[in-house]
Amino acid sequence: MPNIKIFSGSSHPDLSQKIADRLGLELGKVVTKKFSNQETCVEIGESVRGEDVYIVQSGCGEINDNLMELLIMINACKIASACRVTAVIPCFPYARQDKKDKVGSRAPISAKLVANMLSVSGADHIITMDLHASQIQGFFDIPVDNLYAEPAVLKWIKENIPEWKNCTIVSPDAGGAKRVTSIADRLNVDFALIHKERKKANEVDRMVLVGDVTDRVAILVDDMADTCGTICHAADKLISAGATKVYAILTHGIFSGPAISRINNACFEAVVVTNTIPQEEKMKHCPKIQVIDISMILAEAIRRTHNGESVSYLFSHVPL
C-alpha cells in the first residue's frame, strides 16, 4: 500500500496497532507530550507530504485531552502537506449532546461543535462507528462513513448463544428500536422494547416492557452504556417478566462511575462490548465483560477508502 500512513493518538494504541497489523503496515512515528502547563504538543516524526493519512483516536478516557490531541494531529499533518487526512474515531465524543430537549432549551449541541472543530482543523473525511444518532453525519460538510458493529454482533450471537433461535432482542429505550428491529429481522426472532422515563440525565425513573420475553433468552442491544443504570434496571425488568437469561450487547462500553459494580451485581450472563474503547482494566474487575474485536472492520474501511472502493459491503458483512 503506497502513499498511506496510519498514526495513533494516545487514547487507544492497542486498537491502532491491530488496525496497522491487519493492513500490514507500521504505525507512523508520532510523539505526543504535555507541557508543564498541560498544553498538548504533537510532533509528527516522519514525512507526510502527498500521503493519504489516517489518524486513529477514540473518544474515551480523558475525552477533552484526546479530542484536542486529535485536532492538533490533523492540523499538523495538514500543514505538513498531507494529500488527505482522515480521522478514524471509533467512539465519537459528545455524540449524546446532539439536540436541544424540550426541557432545557438552553442546552448546547456539542456534537455539532465537535464536527465544526474537526472540519476547521483540516480533516477531509471521518470514519466512525455506531454514532449515537446517525443524523450526526449531517453536522459535517465532509464525507462521514458511519460503520456498524451489527454484523460482528450477529456473528457473536450465533457463535456464543446456543439458544439464539429462541431469543428476543430487546431495546432498553425507544431510541434504539430501529437498531434492535434490524438485528431481530436478520436473526428472524422477535423483538421487544423498554419504555423508560428519565427525570434527569443518568437517572432512570420507571420502566415499562413492551413485548413478550417469557421463557426466552433476552438480548439487550444498545449503542453505548455509560453508568449502566438503564441496562441493569432493564435486566431486572426482563427477569421479572419471565426471561430465562439476559445478555447485554453494546457497541461502546464507556462504563464510568458505578458501572462495574452495577454489572457485577446485576443478573447478566455476559455483557458484550466492542473494543472501540479499551476494556482491559475493566475486564480485570468484571468477569462478565466480553469483547468483540472490530479492528478488522475499521482496517477494511481504511483499505477500501484508500483504494477508492465502496465501503457499504461492511454494513452487512464482517471482513474475514
Image: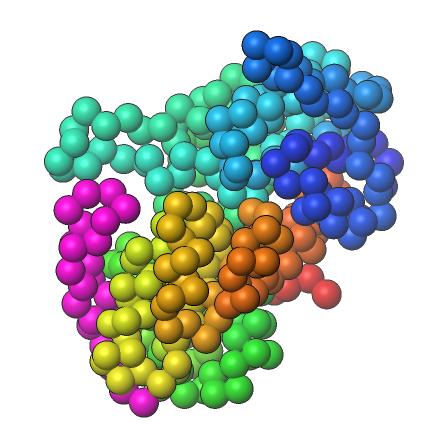
Please identify the dominant SS of the magenta region: strand
201 to 206, vertically: above or below: above
The image shows residue 301 at horizontal and vertical percentages of: 66, 48
Query: Where is 165 relative to 276, above or below?
Result: below
Q: Is residue 273 magenta?
A: no
Q: Is residue 68 left or right of residue 28?
A: left
Residue drawn at the location 39% of the way across and 45% of the way down: 257
Query: Quarter-wise, where is residue 103 in the image?
Result: top left
Q: Is residue 243 left or right of residue 286?
A: left
| Quarter of the figure that contains the N terminus | top right
Q: Quadrant of the C terminus?
A: bottom right
Give the magenta-colored segment's residue range. 193-215
* Residue shown at the point (51%, 43%) measured from the top left: 91
Could you say which is closer to the camera, residue 25 or residue 141?
Answer: 25
Who's the residue at 40% across and 38% down the image? 95
Q: Quadrant of residue 185?
A: bottom left
Residue 125 percent across, percent down from the top left = 59, 32
Please tell me whether residue 207 belongs to the stretch shown in magenta: yes
Does residue 284 appear left or right of residue 306 in this picture? left
Foreground of the two, 215 or 181: 215
State the image coordinates of residue 136 (x, y, percent, origin top left): 40, 38
Frontmost residue, 80 versus 26: 26
In the image, residue 295 above or below residue 167: above
x then y, percent, for residue 290 = 56, 65
Whether residue 109 appears in this view of the structure is: yes
